[in-house]
């Protein structure tokens, strides 16, 4: 997602394909991280709004 | 708790069965057996530790357990697997498993279809969303900038309930404790300092003996990890009892706190300004204190060297130098100075939270240098070169040798998700005027081991994710990296607009 120059938006090398269990693990980690990031932002909003 | 033990029992049984099957396929020797067993035991132990800690209400202990035991276990397990699969002879050939139709479809799909940037909404709605996000951010920034700060008078009055408080100066705010004109001292000055993540406000109590008697933190928008670090080091205590005509310069008569140097310098600057104001205006002392010198020591030289070398392709592309450079960024920018840039720095920059260049050259080199590099050279040298967290991700990848990816459905939405997270984070920063509130990156926490609440779980997830997936955090979550990428895109669009059309 992060680019290093103005000429390209993504310079990731082509990823090696992974099996279905690998995909499940990757999905689990990805979704869990989103959940905790949203939890952190929610916690921040709550601490800002609530006295 | 009973369920935890039951679950752990299931995992232990499953692991034992797996080991038994594995030993039937490969001829395991003692290093393979030790690695696999130790890895499994460490992972199981970390799960038990983490669940126990969460149930006891100590998330920090849970995170540390996952990092120390769980992560070490995963690393040992992976190394043991790699060793077994490559070095040990197979005992029997397993029957080939039929490929899942879905996987075949996904892997056979053209690369373009896998693009994380593929839009999931209609082009018209996508444009509306994009401009809506920009407009809402501008509105949030205006609201944040025009909102009033806290009522410090009420906060100071609350601290000194039994004494009369009279405001004797507006900018900076100075209160007289007791009746006005009662002797020269007993002043309470409100001073603001610019930390690494944002400003903080202190009240300094100076009494008749021209000495500092109390420093009370009133409010702060600094990164919590840095605040905790200086509070743990009892940094404020070294100012108590000092005469107001002292220099109050970090490195001269004030000791810095390692890993929070910008915060310590900013706090010293705030206290120095207050004390010297009282010395001149109230106590009529001659200003004999030293002028604050440019802070250009070893730390600044190291950061400058790292920043300049980031522009040299030879350093970054050739193998032995690359590893030396990566290690330097992890050790110096990360663990030694804890100066990784976060989205809080970028949001703070928009809010006008800019620390003085004399005291905070490191901040200027990294934050302003990176932004100027993007504007003038069209290069983001920070993300894949200087960022210490990227260095850690890269080394983890080298250890694991694995490059998993989430499913195509998630990859398709990844670009939208990271944009949404950046937008949400900046909205929180602008509306609260508190950069640390929207800064969900685990950087400061990783390098100082100080964090708050849920952040404790983001760090192990980011590290474990990076172990299995190439640049997991940078690609899918980093709001700072995404903000820098947006800057590059704006630059490119602006240049395209400025170029004459053929």
Image (cartoon, coloured by chain):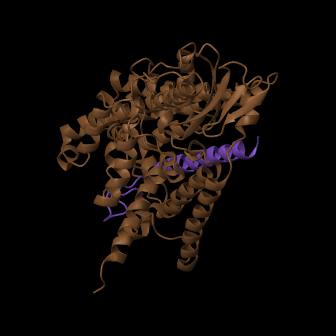
Of residues B354 and B68, the one nearer the viewer is B354
Q: Is residue B229 visible?
A: yes
Q: Position of residue B229 (x, y in %)?
A: 53, 25
Q: Is residue B268 left or right of residue B153?
A: left
Q: Residue furthest bottom?
A: B502
Q: Position of residue A5 (x, y in %)?
A: 31, 59
Which quadrant of the figure contains the N terminus of chain B?
A: top right
Write down the colour of chain B: brown
Q: Is residue A20 visible?
A: no
- Figure quadrant of residue B169: top right
Of residues B225 and B79, the one nearer the viewer is B225
Which quadrant of the figure contains the C terminus of chain B?
A: bottom left
Q: Is residue B292 left or right of residue B314?
A: right
- Figure quadrant of residue B109: bottom left
| Chain represented in purple | A
Q: Residue at x 31, y 50 (%)?
A: B381
Q: Is residue B389 left or right of residue B428?
A: left
Of residues A40 and B364, the one nearer the viewer is B364
Q: Position of residue B99 (x, y in %)?
A: 44, 58
């Amino acid at each position: 997602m992060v680019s290093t120059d103005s000429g390209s938006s993504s310079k990731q090398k082509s990823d090696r394909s992974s099996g279905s269990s690998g995909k499940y693990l990757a999905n689990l980690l990805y979704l869990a991280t989103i959940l905790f990031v949203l939890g952190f932002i929610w916690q921040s909003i709550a601490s800002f709004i609530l006295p | 708790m009973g369920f935890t033990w039951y679950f752990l029992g299931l995992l232990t049984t499953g692991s034992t069965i797996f080991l038994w099957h594995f030993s039937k396929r490969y001829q395991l020797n003692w290093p393979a057996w030790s690695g696999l067993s130790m890895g499994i035991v460490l992972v199981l132990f970390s799960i038990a530790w983490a669940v126990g800690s969460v149930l006891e209400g100590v998330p920090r202990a849970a995170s540390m357990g996952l990092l120390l035991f769980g992560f070490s276990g995963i690393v040992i397990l992976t190394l043991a697997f790699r060793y077994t699969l490559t070095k040990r002879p197979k005992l029997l050939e397993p029957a080939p498993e039929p490929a899942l139709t879905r996987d075949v479809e996904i892997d056979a799909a053209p690369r373009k279809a896998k693009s994380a940037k593929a839009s999931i909404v209609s082009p018209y709605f996508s444009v509306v969303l994009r401009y809506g996000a920009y407009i809402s951010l501008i509105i949030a920034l205006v609201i944040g900038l025009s909102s009033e700060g806290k009522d410090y008078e009420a906060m100071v009055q609350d601290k000194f309930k039994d004494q009369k408080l009279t405001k004797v100066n507006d900018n900076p705010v100075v209160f007289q404790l007791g009746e006005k004109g009662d002797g020269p001292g007993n002043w309470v000055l409100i001073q603001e300092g610019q930390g690494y993540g944002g400003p903080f406000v202190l009240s300094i109590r100076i009494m008749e003996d021209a000495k500092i008697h109390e420093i009370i933190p009133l409010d702060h928008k600094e990164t919590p990890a840095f605040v905790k670090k200086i509070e743990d080091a009892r940094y404020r205590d070294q100012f108590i009892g000092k005469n107001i005509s002292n220099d109050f310069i970090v490195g001269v008569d004030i000791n810095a706190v390692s890993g929070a140097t910008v915060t310590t310098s900013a706090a010293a600057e705030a206290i120095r300004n207050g004390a010297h104001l009282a010395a001149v205006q109230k106590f009529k002392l001659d200003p004999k204190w030293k002028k604050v010198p440019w802070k250009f020591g070893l730390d600044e030289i190291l950061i400058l060297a790292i920043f300049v070398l980031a522009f040299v392709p030879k350093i970054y592309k050739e193998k032995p130098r690359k590893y030396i450079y990566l290690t330097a960024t992890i050790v110096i920018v990360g663990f030694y100075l804890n100066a990784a840039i976060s989205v809080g720095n970028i949001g703070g920059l928009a809010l006008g939270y800019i620390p003085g260049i004399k005291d905070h050259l490191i901040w200027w080199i990294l934050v302003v240098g990176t932004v100027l590099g993007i504007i003038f050279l069209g290069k983001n040298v920070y993300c894949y070169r200087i960022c210490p967290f990227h260095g850690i991700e890269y080394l983890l990848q080298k250890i694991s040798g694995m490059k998993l990816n989430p499913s195509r459905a998630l990859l398709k939405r990844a670009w939208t998700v990271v944009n949404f997270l950046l937008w949400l984070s900046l909205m929180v920063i602008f509306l609260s005027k508190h950069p640390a509130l929207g800064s969900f990156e685990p950087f400061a926490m990783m390098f100082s081991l100080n964090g708050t609440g849920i952040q404790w779980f983001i760090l192990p997830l980011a590290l474990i994710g990076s172990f299995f997936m190439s640049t997991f955090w940078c690609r899918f979550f980093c709001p700072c990296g995404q903000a820098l990428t947006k800057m590059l895109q704006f630059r490119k669009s602006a240049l395209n607009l400025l170029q004459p059309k053929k």
